Each structure stands twice: as C-alpha cells, then as structure tokens.
Image: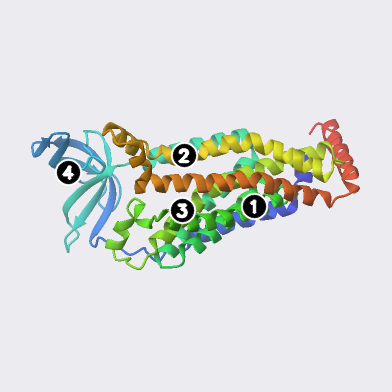
Amino acid sequence: MYGIIKRMDKKELIFVVLFTVIIGIVAALPTGFEKQIYFNSEGVRARVLETDESTVYNIGLIAQGEQRGVIEIESGTHKGIQVEGVNLLTGRNEFDKMFNTGDEVWALLEFDQEGNIIFANLIDHYRINKELILIAIFAGLLVLFSGFTGVRTILSFAFALISIWKILIPLMLKGYDPLLVGLVIGNVLTVSTLLLVAGFTKKAYAAILAAVACSLVTAFMAVAFTKYFMIDGTVMQWSESLLYAGFMSLDLTGIFQAGIYLACSGAILDLAIDISAALDEIVMSNPAISKAELMKSGLRIGKSVVGSQTTTLLLAYMGSYISVMMVYMAQGTPMLNILNSKAIASEILHTFVGCIGLVMVSPLTSMICSLMYEVEGQTSLVNGSQRLIEETADVATGV
C-alpha cells in the first residue's frame, strides 16, 4: 500500500481534493431561476391510504376525470396529517397516472392565509428513494471494481451533472450563445474527466488534445449540416413550451446544435482515452518504438474500436425514436417519406455528425501520441527500465 501511495502523483491527489471543493462550490451556485412559481404551496411526500375512482370515466384507451383518495403526509410542515387528495386525469397517457392504496406519491399542498390545507394535488409517484438506490448500486459497483479510479469517475460524473444543471442550462435560458456555452462546458468536462481518470500523464494530455479538436470539428459540422438539412430547433421535444413560457428570444436552433455536440462529446473523449491508453502501454512495453510504428499501432487499434463506438452511438440515438418508427411502420408509411420527415432527418443528422467526429478521433489521437512520445527520444528506454525496476521492487516488498 505504501508503494502505491509513494508512486501516486501529488498533483493528482491535490487535483482530486481541489476538484471536490469545486463541485461543492458549483453545487451551491444559484441558477437565477429559483423563484417560487406556486405561492402558498409546498411539495411533500405522502402515502395513499384509500382511493375513489367513482368520477373516473374511460373513453377508448384513455381515462378522464378525477381520481380521489385519502393520503397521509410523510414530510414537510404538515407531517402526519391525513387529507383528501385529487389526481387530475387529462386524457394523455404519457402524463396521466393512477394510484393504488399503499403507493408513495409526491403531492402539492395549497394553503390559505392561515396556513390550512385547502387542496392537495397528487402530482406523481414518489421515486426519489428508488433513484437513490439505483445510484448507490452504480457507485458501489464502480468503486468495488475500479477502486480509487472509481471514486474519481464518480467525481467527474457528479461534476458533469452539476455543471449542466447549474451552469449550462441557466446560461442558455439567460440568452447566451448556446453553441459557445455548450463548447466551453463540454470541453471543461472533457478536460476534468480525463485528468481525473488518467491523471496528469501524457496519455491524458493526448486524449484531451484529440477530444477538444474533434469537438470543434463536430460543432462546425452541426452548424453546417443543420442549415444544409433546413432543420430548426423546434424539432426538439418541449422546445416550443420554452417560447410559450416567456423565453421568446431563445435560439432554439443553436440549442439543437449544441445538443448534437454534447451528445457525442462523451463518446469522443471515451474513444480518445482508449486509444491513447493503449498506445501508452505499447510505449511502456517497447520504449524504442518509432514514431511511424506507434501511429500505425494507433490506427490499427482505432479500426476495431471505432466500429463498435459508432454502432453504440447509433443505438443510443435511435433507441429513443423506436416508438416513432413503429408508428410510421404501422401506418404503412413509405421509407422515403420516413427518411424525409423532419423528426427522422434530425436524428440522422444527430447520429452521423457524431459518428464523423468519432471516426476522426482515431487518426488524430494516434498522430498526437506519436508526436508526444517521440519527445522522450533515447531516454524512453531508460525511463521504461527505471519504471520496471520500481514495480519489481514493490512486488518484492509485498505491495
């Protein structure tokens, strides 16, 4: 254990501690959109004690009316009180839900001037505890199989989520250029993730340079092909709701273009570090390898990895559109009509711009690695031998 701590770069340890502090600071940042929409109200967790469906009526496949029920409040200022709650059914199955006795729900309570409950709206099933269990399983398995690297991965994951919620989305809502904001946030996440996972090493630096370069190319292609395909940002789900909510000046097309880049940036950095880590291992095993041979090795590795990564990207994008494709097929829509539709064309744009960015990662990362590792020159063999001696000594001492 002492040997591992001894070999650990102090810069990496300091960076992890500093990064944890940064996550705390970003999490505490106000978004500027904390205003209370519903006055004299409170969201609470509650349990359904009984239900009444006498005012619910079915029309074909949909239900309308009101489901009523008695709930017991389990959180908030009125904890322990039993009140009648109402579940309003709109006739839209994607939003409507039915509750059963014993279900935990999230309810919105409305109060009068004296603080008495005048209405309880049953919003949805309560899922926070289930989400926390799923996250805990993910974090536990990651740490179990990856050790301290897993902890750093969790930090990068948390930083990505917090940065998107606390910085990216608020800046876009405030009218800042969405593509510029997306590029800045995306590249900050790329740099921080790769430094956390790979440390302050050449393989991390090479992956960072390649990922950032490919992200710029991807963003440029997203802008160019969005105009070429004549697609605007209203193709995004819920986008028009932003306009109706008062954000008339938002650049929806720019948000769509930023989304194309952000959606593939994770796959780009993943492929970049895969190739650079593999080349780093090759250099460690053969420090005298030439620049040309190292680049050829990178290209050969990339041939295998790029194919699987592009397929992964395709499945990730198209998976969310399975129901749309099923509707088209069920209606007997001709294939040319499907491919020419705005929704499907936007997904084709999304998918293949991202795939082009992935294809470029392999040669670019290979070239950067061949240039960076060549700098070592004749000292590569000496450094490799010294590293082997240190590792052999650690094994001999029982580390």
Q: Residue 318: in sight, yes or no? A: yes
Between discs 3 and 1, the one toward the N terminus: 1
Residue reaching furthest to the left? 54
Between discs 4 and 1, the one toward the N terminus: 1
Q: Nearer the viewer, mark 3 or mark 4?
A: 3
SS for callout 4:
strand
Q: Nearer the viewer, mark 4 or mark 1?
A: 4
Colour scheme of this structure image?
rainbow
Q: Position of residue 249 (x, y in %)?
A: 35, 68
Left or right: 245 as drawn, with respect to 32:
left
Left or right: 163 as drawn, with respect to 338:
right
Q: Position of residue 39 (x, y in %)?
A: 24, 62
Please name the amino acid that badge 3 sits on: Gly
Q: For the N terminus, which image quadrant?
A: top right
Please name the amino acid that badge 2 sits on: Ala
As drawn, 360 above or below 146: below
Residue beneath disc 1 = 16
Q: Nearer the viewer, residue 254 or 131?
A: 254
Pointer 2 local density, CA inside 10 Å: few below 14, some 14–19, many at least 20 = few
Pointer 1 local density, CA inside 10 Å: few below 14, some 14–19, many at least 20 = many
Left or right: 64 as drawn, with respect to 394:
left
Q: Are marks 3 and 2 in contact (CB under 8 Å)?
A: no
Q: Quadrant of residue 251?
A: bottom left
SS for callout 1:
helix
Between discs 3 and 2, the one toward the N terminus: 3
Q: Nearer the viewer, mark 3 or mark 1?
A: 3
Q: Position of residue 309 (x, y in %)?
A: 57, 38
**Residue at position x 28%, y 49% from top?**
44
